[in-house]
Image (tube, rainbow, N blue to C red):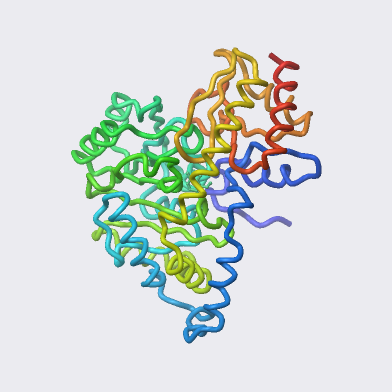
Amino acid sequence: MEGRLSSRADLILDSCIMRLITVARRPGMISFATGLPDNSLFDTEGLRRAADEVLSGDDVKGALQYGESEGLLSLRKRIADRCRKEAGINATADRVLMTNGSQECFDLLGKMFLDPGDAMAVENPGYLGALQAYSVYGPRMIGVDLSDSGPDIRQLESALKEDPKLFYSIPNHQNPSGMSYSKSARCEVAEILSETDTVLVEDDAYGELGYRGRAGRAISSMTDNSVMTGSFSKIISPGMRIGWMVVPDWLLPKATQFLEAFCLQAGSFTQRVMDRFLAKNDMDAYLRPIRAEYLRKKNLFSDLMEDMLPQSFSWNDPDGGMFFWLRTPEGTDAMRLVDAAMDRKVVLMPGSPFHVRGGENTVRLNFATASDEDMKEGMCRLGKAASDVF
Ligand SMILES: Cc1ncc(COP(=O)(O)O)c(C=O)c1O
């Protein structure tokens, strides 16, 4: 006999992300599908040294014991300093709450803000993992289309008339589209939101992965009513599961309580390892070769697309992050390409699940994960798949 699930179990959006990771691991598969960073860029040696130091240091008991719900203070200070210096936001350590990856933040925010039927504005397309996390709380998602330089401001204004509790946005090197907000779009969004009580959720997962540095000041530096979420996943290690959110003072007590109820705290050990690792590395020097390598891979991927894909396809030129946003001709169904690629053992992520409307002719391509050899072989196969169906 099966147990009885809550009504939320019917609400949760299907996200194929983790399923695709499993498919991509099958022998012979080449994946352009997921958001995994390049394995070869993990500083395994540096992290091993940091872990050794934690395990042989004076505070080993602290590392292996429960800790405070808010997270490790020294790490929170480092994050607050970086947020102030790089993103321009007025962060202090006491406003930084550590989480097990930034994905947790979306669930917590959903839990804190959303009742079934509440309006919430989201980018269209938007990051599927976050949309899935919010979906559990039954919001009515209002899509705001993205252009090359930011959200459609008219659509955002009209969404705000429906009194959304949250606006979820990724202003830097967005997943899936690779797009970043222009300076004026950031200012406009901050200005429009400041006339409402809609809370901006500014997801900064790719903020440090601009090839020429940060794409722009955080919108959270221009408005008080915002929560900024961040993560070490894309630049240091997703497996360590270290994320955070910077919350406004008025939200701090509730957010801490919810965090405690949810998971007690983020992992003590991994936070200490990360803290040691950061103590040994100047962040800008650490990021330089990583940014350079992703830029090199992006250029290689772009050249291969030029050579192998039909002229009727188009794509953007991202200046950071991990994704190209591919469009098959208007009116066509990109699932045909996704299926044909799968037949040739190339895994792609269709673009339509990232949308609340439209997007049938889009595909997200990750250029960060594959090795050069796999990239070349995978693009060769993709070119053939494209000529099978287009
Ligand atoms: C835009 C965006 N935000 C958040 C996340 C969640 O990352 P994590 O939970 O590893 O911090 C991801 C992961 O792919 C992402 O692409």
In the current view of this chain or complex, which residue is farthest to the right? 27
Q: Which image quarter: residue 143?
A: top left
Instruction: Give residue 367's position: percent from left, percent from top.
Output: 59, 37
Residue visible at 46% across and 58% down in the picture: 243
Residue 357 appears left or right of 304: left
Q: How many labels does the image show?
A: 0
Residue in the foreground of this view, choosing between 124 and 322: 322
Residue 212 appears left or right of 353: left
Residue in the foreground of this view, choosing between 362 and 213: 213
Instruction: Give residue 179's position: percent from left, percent from top.
Output: 43, 32
Residue visible at 48% across and 82% down in the picture: 62
Instruction: Give residue 164's position: percent from left, percent from top.
Output: 32, 39
Q: Which image quarter: residue 189?
A: top left
Residue 72 appears left or right of 226: right
Q: Is residue 315 visible?
A: yes
The quarter of the picture where the C terminus appears is top right
In the current view of this chain or complex, which residue is farthest to the left? 195
Q: Is residue 118 visible?
A: no
Residue in the foreground of this view, choosing between 17 and 176: 176
Q: Which image quarter: residue 31?
A: top right
Instruction: Give residue 348's position: percent from left, percent from top.
Output: 66, 33
Residue 216 appears left or right of 44: left
The quarter of the picture where the N terminus appears is bottom right
